[in-house]
Image: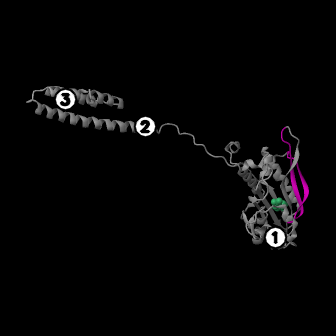
């Protein structure tokens, strides 16, 4: 019996050496350690032994089974953890997964393009606050209190003196108050209006303001600059018209329309900007000598300009953050 135990021990040790999978380990457990396994059989045989032999054989059998059970468990555990580490194994030679990256928002693409065009014409870029005072948004631009022109712009007031700017024009006044001419600036930014939201209007949109103040600035220069801008932005064959208009801060004032002909539909004129010669009152109010200096100003509507260029017919798509729309550009 002792020999038999030795033999099974050697056999099992041999099998443990070659064990290479969890399945194989399970096979060994069944073969040796289960209720019908080889050790269970040995214990059955042990019961039949004559009394005098039992102590010695029993001790040996228990010892061997104990040792081998431990050894088996150890092998089994290390096998399981190594197969786990295979699961987490990273193959550094594989090609990388392509990460999805975002796109520059179409409005920002337009803004960048506009800035580049005006920079090439000698304009510098400035910014101003979106939370603005009544003083800068209206008064400094020749809108006295109760002036009817204030109704042109439905305003979000924060308190009686502060508001969300309704246009980028207040930054003109800010620049004039702190800079000696010549001033040649563009001012991009967000503006806010308390308007009913529709395909045509939104409570928030973008403008780029332009201001040029120097000696002898003329309307002809304003005209030339805007035409050259429109041709660069929309292409040489762009159809445009200057239409007389009114703004409290310019005199004379004009609006510029661009001809828009969507495929299969009737064409029409769309307004993209307001402009004019800076009213002498505005120059004086903001500390510039109107006898010595003249200036022109303009304000571009960025959403409008973008819609026209790309054939988009609903302003709300710019603010929906729908990737299916944004990724097209
Ligand atoms: N601020 C005007 C608006 O939002 C647009 C505008 C018109 C700006 C004429 C100008 C300008 O600088 O000269 O409706």
Report the disc number at residue 87: 2
Coordinates of residue 295 in the picture (x, y in percent)? 84, 65
Coordinates of residue 158 in the picture (x, y in percent)? 73, 66
Res 325 seen here: yes
What is the spatial separation of the Cα atoms under label 1 and label 2, in whole angstroms?
A: 71 Å
Report the disc number at residue 139: 1
- How many other residues sit within 10 Å of disc 2, few (<14), some (14-19) or many (≥20)? few
- Tell how many labels: 3
Please tell me which residue is depicted at 81% across the width and 61% down the height of the picture.
154
Contact? badges 1 and 2 (CB < 8 Å): no
Residue that label 3 marks? 43
Q: Earlier in the sequence, mark 2 or mark 3?
A: 3
What is the spatial separation of the Cα atoms under label 2 and label 3, in whole angstroms?
A: 40 Å
Disc 2, SS:
helix
**Is 28 in front, or is 108?**
28
What is the spatial separation of the Cα atoms under label 1 and label 3, in whole angstroms?
A: 106 Å
The stretch of residues the image draws in magenta is: 237-263
Coordinates of residue 107 in the picture (x, y in percent)? 73, 51
Magenta segment, principal secondary structure? strand
Q: Is residue 256 above or below residue 4?
A: below
Please tell me which residue is depicted at 84% across the width and 70% down the height of the picture.
282
Q: Earlier in the sequence, mark 1 or mark 2?
A: 2
- How many other residues sit within 10 Å of disc 1, few (<14), some (14-19) or many (≥20)? some
């Amino acid at each position: 019996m002792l020999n038999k135990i030795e033999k099974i021990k050697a056999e099992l040790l041999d099998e443990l050496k070659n064990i290479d999978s969890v399945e194989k380990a399970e096979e060994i457990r069944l073969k040796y350690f289960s209720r019908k396994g080889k050790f269970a059989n040995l214990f059955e045989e042990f019961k039949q032994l004559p009394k005098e032999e039992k102590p010695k054989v029993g001790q040996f059998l228990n010892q061997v089974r104990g040792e081998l059970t431990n050894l088996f468990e150890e092998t089994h555990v290390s096998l399981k953890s190594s197969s786990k580490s295979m699961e987490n194994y990273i193959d550094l030679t594989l090609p990388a997964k392509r990460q999805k990256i975002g796109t520059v928002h179409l409005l920002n693409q337009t803004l960048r393009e506009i800035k580049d065009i005006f920079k090439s014409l000698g304009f510098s870029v400035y910014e101003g606050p979106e939370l603005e005072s009544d003083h800068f948004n209206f008064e400094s631009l020749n809108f006295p209190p109760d002036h009817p022109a204030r109704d042109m712009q439905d305003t979000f007031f924060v308190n009686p003196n502060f508001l969300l700017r309704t246009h980028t024009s207040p930054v003109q006044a800010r620049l004039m108050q702190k800079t000696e001419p010549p001033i040649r600036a563009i001012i991009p930014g967000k503006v806010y209006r308390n308007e009913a939201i529709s395909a045509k209007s939104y409570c928030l949109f973008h403008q780029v303001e332009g201001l040029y103040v120097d000696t002898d600035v003329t309307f002809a220069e304003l005209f030339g600059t805007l035409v050259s801008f429109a041709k660069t932005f929309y292409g040489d064959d762009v159809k445009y018209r200057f239409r007389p208009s009114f703004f409290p801060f310019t005199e004379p004032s004009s609006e510029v329309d661009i001809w828009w002909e969507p495929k299969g539909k009737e064409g029409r004129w769309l307004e993209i900007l307001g402009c004019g010669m800076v009213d002498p009152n505005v120059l004086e109010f903001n500390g510039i000598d109107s006898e010595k200096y003249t200036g022109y100003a303009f304000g571009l509507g960025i959403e409008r300009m973008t819609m026209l260029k790309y054939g988009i017919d609903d302003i709300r798509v710019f603010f929906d953050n729908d990737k299916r729309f944004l990724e097209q550009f």
